[in-house]
Image (cartoon, grey):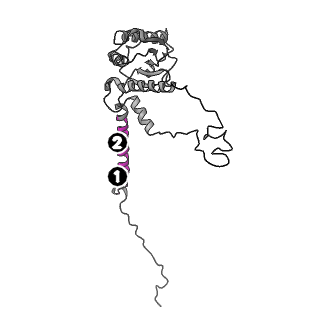
Amino acid sequence: MRANANAPVIIKRVKKVSGGGHHGGAWKVAYADFVTAMMAFFLLMWLLNATTEKQRKGIADYFNPTIPITRVSGGGEGSFGGDSVFVEETLSQSGNGGIPRDPGPPEGGADDAAAENARLEELEEMLFARGGESMASDGIARHIVTRVTDEGLLVELFDLDGAPLFEPNTTTPTTVLSELTELIARVFALVENGVAIEGHVATQPVVVIENTAWTLSTGRATQLRKMFEDSALAPERIARVTGHADREPAIGNAMAIRNNRIELILLRTGR
Protein backbone atom coordinates (compact mmCIF):
# COMPACT_ATOMS: atom_id res chain seq x y z
CA MET A 1 0.00 0.00 0.00
CA ARG A 2 1.26 3.48 -0.94
CA ALA A 3 1.78 6.02 1.79
CA ASN A 4 -0.32 8.74 0.04
CA ALA A 5 -3.35 6.57 -0.69
CA ASN A 6 -5.61 8.70 1.56
CA ALA A 7 -4.49 12.07 0.18
CA PRO A 8 -7.33 14.35 -1.05
CA VAL A 9 -8.07 14.55 -4.76
CA ILE A 10 -7.93 18.10 -6.13
CA ILE A 11 -9.93 18.85 -9.28
CA LYS A 12 -9.13 22.07 -11.13
CA ARG A 13 -11.90 23.46 -13.32
CA VAL A 14 -10.95 26.08 -15.86
CA LYS A 15 -13.71 28.50 -16.93
CA LYS A 16 -13.40 29.40 -20.58
CA VAL A 17 -14.81 32.76 -21.61
CA SER A 18 -15.28 33.50 -25.28
CA GLY A 19 -16.95 36.44 -27.01
CA GLY A 20 -17.80 38.32 -23.81
CA GLY A 21 -18.08 42.03 -23.25
CA HIS A 22 -17.41 44.33 -26.14
CA HIS A 23 -15.93 41.47 -28.14
CA GLY A 24 -19.39 39.87 -28.62
CA GLY A 25 -21.91 40.59 -31.41
CA ALA A 26 -25.19 40.98 -29.48
CA TRP A 27 -24.85 44.78 -29.28
CA LYS A 28 -24.71 44.99 -33.07
CA VAL A 29 -28.18 43.47 -33.37
CA ALA A 30 -29.59 45.91 -30.81
CA TYR A 31 -27.93 48.85 -32.56
CA ALA A 32 -29.29 47.76 -35.94
CA ASP A 33 -32.82 47.56 -34.48
CA PHE A 34 -32.40 51.07 -33.04
CA VAL A 35 -31.23 52.53 -36.36
CA THR A 36 -34.12 50.84 -38.19
CA ALA A 37 -36.63 52.27 -35.73
CA MET A 38 -35.16 55.77 -36.12
CA MET A 39 -35.34 55.51 -39.92
CA ALA A 40 -39.00 54.47 -39.69
CA PHE A 41 -39.71 57.38 -37.33
CA PHE A 42 -38.14 60.02 -39.58
CA LEU A 43 -39.89 58.51 -42.61
CA LEU A 44 -43.21 58.84 -40.78
CA MET A 45 -42.46 62.47 -39.90
CA TRP A 46 -41.62 63.23 -43.52
CA LEU A 47 -44.83 61.62 -44.79
CA LEU A 48 -46.96 63.58 -42.29
CA ASN A 49 -45.39 66.82 -43.46
CA ALA A 50 -45.64 65.99 -47.18
CA THR A 51 -49.33 65.02 -47.26
CA THR A 52 -52.57 66.95 -46.82
CA GLU A 53 -55.06 66.29 -44.06
CA LYS A 54 -57.41 64.62 -46.55
CA GLN A 55 -54.65 62.31 -47.77
CA ARG A 56 -53.68 61.39 -44.20
CA LYS A 57 -57.30 60.51 -43.46
CA GLY A 58 -57.36 58.28 -46.55
CA ILE A 59 -54.21 56.49 -45.39
CA ALA A 60 -55.66 56.04 -41.90
CA ASP A 61 -58.89 54.62 -43.34
CA TYR A 62 -56.87 52.20 -45.50
CA PHE A 63 -55.20 50.71 -42.42
CA ASN A 64 -58.43 50.73 -40.40
CA PRO A 65 -60.99 48.98 -42.62
CA THR A 66 -64.53 48.50 -41.47
CA ILE A 67 -66.60 45.36 -41.97
CA PRO A 68 -70.11 46.12 -43.22
CA ILE A 69 -72.91 44.42 -41.32
CA THR A 70 -76.06 43.76 -43.27
CA ARG A 71 -79.45 43.62 -41.66
CA VAL A 72 -80.83 41.29 -44.35
CA SER A 73 -80.44 37.55 -43.93
CA GLY A 74 -80.03 35.12 -46.75
CA GLY A 75 -83.21 33.24 -45.84
CA GLY A 76 -83.74 29.62 -46.62
CA GLU A 77 -85.95 26.63 -46.02
CA GLY A 78 -86.80 25.51 -42.54
CA SER A 79 -89.15 26.11 -39.67
CA PHE A 80 -88.49 29.84 -39.53
CA GLY A 81 -87.69 30.53 -43.18
CA GLY A 82 -84.27 31.93 -42.40
CA ASP A 83 -85.31 33.91 -39.31
CA SER A 84 -84.17 33.27 -35.76
CA VAL A 85 -86.48 32.90 -32.79
CA PHE A 86 -84.63 35.96 -31.43
CA VAL A 87 -85.32 37.97 -34.57
CA GLU A 88 -85.94 41.19 -32.62
CA GLU A 89 -82.55 40.96 -30.90
CA THR A 90 -80.30 40.00 -33.79
CA LEU A 91 -78.64 42.09 -36.50
CA SER A 92 -79.46 39.79 -39.39
CA GLN A 93 -83.13 40.13 -40.27
CA SER A 94 -85.45 39.49 -43.13
CA GLY A 95 -87.95 41.98 -44.47
CA ASN A 96 -90.90 40.22 -42.84
CA GLY A 97 -90.23 40.64 -39.14
CA GLY A 98 -88.11 42.36 -36.54
CA ILE A 99 -87.19 46.03 -36.65
CA PRO A 100 -88.98 47.90 -39.48
CA ARG A 101 -86.89 49.06 -42.38
CA ASP A 102 -86.45 52.66 -43.44
CA PRO A 103 -88.77 53.07 -46.44
CA GLY A 104 -86.19 55.41 -48.04
CA PRO A 105 -86.89 58.32 -50.37
CA PRO A 106 -89.84 58.24 -52.73
CA GLU A 107 -89.43 56.83 -56.21
CA GLY A 108 -87.51 59.18 -58.46
CA GLY A 109 -85.99 61.07 -55.52
CA ALA A 110 -83.25 58.47 -55.06
CA ASP A 111 -82.07 58.93 -58.65
CA ASP A 112 -82.00 62.71 -58.28
CA ALA A 113 -80.06 62.50 -55.02
CA ALA A 114 -77.57 60.07 -56.54
CA ALA A 115 -77.06 62.33 -59.55
CA GLU A 116 -76.48 65.36 -57.34
CA ASN A 117 -74.03 63.41 -55.16
CA ALA A 118 -72.15 62.47 -58.31
CA ARG A 119 -71.96 66.13 -59.37
CA LEU A 120 -70.72 67.23 -55.95
CA GLU A 121 -68.12 64.48 -55.87
CA GLU A 122 -66.97 65.47 -59.35
CA LEU A 123 -66.39 69.03 -58.15
CA GLU A 124 -64.54 67.65 -55.14
CA GLU A 125 -62.32 65.64 -57.48
CA MET A 126 -61.34 68.83 -59.26
CA LEU A 127 -59.83 70.16 -56.04
CA PHE A 128 -58.26 66.85 -54.99
CA ALA A 129 -57.84 64.60 -58.01
CA ARG A 130 -57.20 61.04 -56.84
CA GLY A 131 -56.24 59.78 -60.27
CA GLY A 132 -54.66 62.85 -61.86
CA GLU A 133 -53.49 66.40 -61.32
CA SER A 134 -55.25 68.54 -58.74
CA MET A 135 -56.32 72.11 -59.47
CA ALA A 136 -54.85 73.10 -56.11
CA SER A 137 -51.09 73.46 -55.86
CA ASP A 138 -49.25 71.73 -53.03
CA GLY A 139 -48.77 75.05 -51.25
CA ILE A 140 -52.46 75.89 -50.89
CA ALA A 141 -53.86 72.35 -50.92
CA ARG A 142 -52.66 71.96 -47.33
CA HIS A 143 -55.28 74.52 -46.28
CA ILE A 144 -58.25 72.62 -47.76
CA VAL A 145 -60.43 69.79 -46.47
CA THR A 146 -63.52 68.77 -48.43
CA ARG A 147 -66.39 66.37 -47.80
CA VAL A 148 -69.89 65.77 -49.11
CA THR A 149 -72.53 66.24 -46.41
CA ASP A 150 -76.32 66.20 -46.23
CA GLU A 151 -76.28 69.97 -46.85
CA GLY A 152 -73.94 69.85 -49.82
CA LEU A 153 -70.22 69.96 -50.67
CA LEU A 154 -68.34 71.45 -47.72
CA VAL A 155 -64.97 73.07 -48.46
CA GLU A 156 -63.09 73.97 -45.28
CA LEU A 157 -60.25 76.50 -45.43
CA PHE A 158 -58.09 76.75 -42.30
CA ASP A 159 -54.97 78.40 -40.88
CA LEU A 160 -51.61 76.65 -40.62
CA ASP A 161 -48.54 77.54 -38.58
CA GLY A 162 -46.82 80.38 -40.38
CA ALA A 163 -49.47 80.49 -43.13
CA PRO A 164 -52.71 82.15 -41.90
CA LEU A 165 -55.68 82.99 -44.10
CA PHE A 166 -56.09 86.44 -42.54
CA GLU A 167 -53.68 88.84 -40.90
CA PRO A 168 -53.71 88.19 -37.12
CA ASN A 169 -56.85 89.50 -35.39
CA THR A 170 -58.06 91.27 -38.55
CA THR A 171 -60.30 90.64 -41.56
CA THR A 172 -57.48 91.44 -44.00
CA PRO A 173 -56.95 88.42 -46.28
CA THR A 174 -53.48 87.05 -47.02
CA THR A 175 -52.13 85.98 -50.41
CA VAL A 176 -52.94 82.36 -49.55
CA LEU A 177 -56.64 83.15 -49.09
CA SER A 178 -56.72 85.16 -52.32
CA GLU A 179 -55.39 82.16 -54.27
CA LEU A 180 -57.82 79.81 -52.55
CA THR A 181 -60.77 82.10 -53.29
CA GLU A 182 -59.93 82.32 -56.98
CA LEU A 183 -59.56 78.55 -57.22
CA ILE A 184 -62.83 77.74 -55.44
CA ALA A 185 -64.75 80.43 -57.32
CA ARG A 186 -63.72 78.83 -60.64
CA VAL A 187 -64.91 75.42 -59.44
CA PHE A 188 -68.20 76.73 -57.99
CA ALA A 189 -68.87 78.65 -61.23
CA LEU A 190 -69.29 75.34 -63.05
CA VAL A 191 -72.67 74.81 -61.32
CA GLU A 192 -75.56 77.03 -60.25
CA ASN A 193 -76.06 75.87 -56.65
CA GLY A 194 -76.25 78.38 -53.83
CA VAL A 195 -73.28 78.97 -51.56
CA ALA A 196 -73.17 79.42 -47.78
CA ILE A 197 -70.19 81.05 -46.04
CA GLU A 198 -69.51 80.38 -42.35
CA GLY A 199 -66.72 81.93 -40.30
CA HIS A 200 -65.04 80.31 -37.27
CA VAL A 201 -62.22 81.51 -35.02
CA ALA A 202 -60.16 80.05 -32.20
CA THR A 203 -61.00 80.84 -28.59
CA GLN A 204 -59.31 84.02 -27.39
CA PRO A 205 -57.48 84.23 -24.04
CA VAL A 206 -59.63 85.27 -21.09
CA VAL A 207 -57.20 88.11 -20.33
CA VAL A 208 -58.11 90.12 -23.43
CA ILE A 209 -59.91 93.38 -22.73
CA GLU A 210 -62.58 92.76 -25.38
CA ASN A 211 -63.47 89.40 -26.87
CA THR A 212 -63.89 89.93 -30.61
CA ALA A 213 -64.70 86.32 -31.56
CA TRP A 214 -68.19 87.13 -32.84
CA THR A 215 -67.30 90.24 -34.82
CA LEU A 216 -64.10 88.66 -36.17
CA SER A 217 -65.77 85.47 -37.42
CA THR A 218 -68.64 87.41 -39.00
CA GLY A 219 -66.28 89.98 -40.51
CA ARG A 220 -64.07 87.32 -42.07
CA ALA A 221 -67.07 85.54 -43.58
CA THR A 222 -68.30 88.87 -44.97
CA GLN A 223 -64.86 89.62 -46.40
CA LEU A 224 -64.85 86.29 -48.21
CA ARG A 225 -68.30 87.08 -49.64
CA LYS A 226 -66.91 90.31 -51.09
CA MET A 227 -63.94 88.43 -52.56
CA PHE A 228 -66.29 85.92 -54.19
CA GLU A 229 -68.44 88.69 -55.64
CA ASP A 230 -65.32 90.27 -57.14
CA SER A 231 -64.39 86.95 -58.76
CA ALA A 232 -66.27 84.59 -61.07
CA LEU A 233 -69.11 83.86 -58.60
CA ALA A 234 -72.42 85.64 -59.16
CA PRO A 235 -73.47 87.66 -56.05
CA GLU A 236 -77.03 86.30 -56.09
CA ARG A 237 -75.72 82.79 -55.45
CA ILE A 238 -74.62 83.68 -51.90
CA ALA A 239 -77.38 82.15 -49.77
CA ARG A 240 -76.13 83.13 -46.30
CA VAL A 241 -73.14 84.53 -44.44
CA THR A 242 -72.73 83.41 -40.82
CA GLY A 243 -70.25 83.95 -38.00
CA HIS A 244 -70.02 81.21 -35.36
CA ALA A 245 -67.29 82.79 -33.18
CA ASP A 246 -65.50 80.01 -31.25
CA ARG A 247 -68.61 77.94 -30.59
CA GLU A 248 -67.78 75.04 -32.96
CA PRO A 249 -64.05 74.18 -32.65
CA ALA A 250 -62.65 71.78 -35.22
CA ILE A 251 -60.28 70.11 -32.73
CA GLY A 252 -60.20 69.57 -28.97
CA ASN A 253 -57.82 72.46 -28.19
CA ALA A 254 -60.17 75.42 -28.57
CA MET A 255 -57.27 77.91 -28.77
CA ALA A 256 -55.43 76.09 -31.59
CA ILE A 257 -55.00 78.00 -34.84
CA ARG A 258 -56.63 75.06 -36.66
CA ASN A 259 -59.94 76.46 -35.42
CA ASN A 260 -59.42 79.64 -37.46
CA ARG A 261 -61.28 78.60 -40.57
CA ILE A 262 -63.87 79.44 -43.20
CA GLU A 263 -66.41 76.81 -44.25
CA LEU A 264 -67.86 77.12 -47.75
CA ILE A 265 -70.90 74.97 -48.51
CA LEU A 266 -72.05 74.39 -52.07
CA LEU A 267 -75.70 73.81 -51.20
CA ARG A 268 -77.79 71.04 -52.66
CA THR A 269 -80.61 71.94 -55.02
CA GLY A 270 -83.66 73.24 -53.17
CA ARG A 271 -81.78 74.39 -50.05
Q: What residue sits 43% from the left and 38% below the top?
A: 62
Above/below status of 69 relative to 125:
below
Percent of width and height locating residue 35: 35, 45
In the image, residue 11 sits, relative to residue 43, either above or below, namely below
Residue 215 sits inside the magenta stretch: no
Question: In what element is the residue under mark 2?
Answer: helix
Nearest to the observer: residue 11 or residue 29: 29
Q: Which residues are magenta?
A: 24-46
Helix, strand or loop for the magenta stretch, by majority: helix
Q: Does the image show residue 186?
A: yes
Circle 2 residues within 10 Å: few <14, some 14–19, many ≥20: few
What x and y, as percent, mark residue 152? 46, 21
Residue occupying the far front of the picture: 107
Amino acid type, callout 1: Lys
Q: Residue at x 33, y 57 (%)?
A: 23
Residue 118 location, quadrant: top left
The disc placed on residue 196 is none
- Looking at the rendered structure, the kind of residue marked 2 is Met
Indicate left or right for 79 with 224 as reference: right
Q: Which residue is mark 1?
A: 28
Residue at which label 2 appears: 39
Q: On the rendered structure, is 257 left or right of 248?
A: left
- The Cα atoms of the two marked residues, 1 and 2, are separated by 16 Å
Residue that appears at 37% across and 59% down? 20
State the residue in front, 32 or 99: 99
Residue 212, position in %: x, y?
Answer: 47, 10
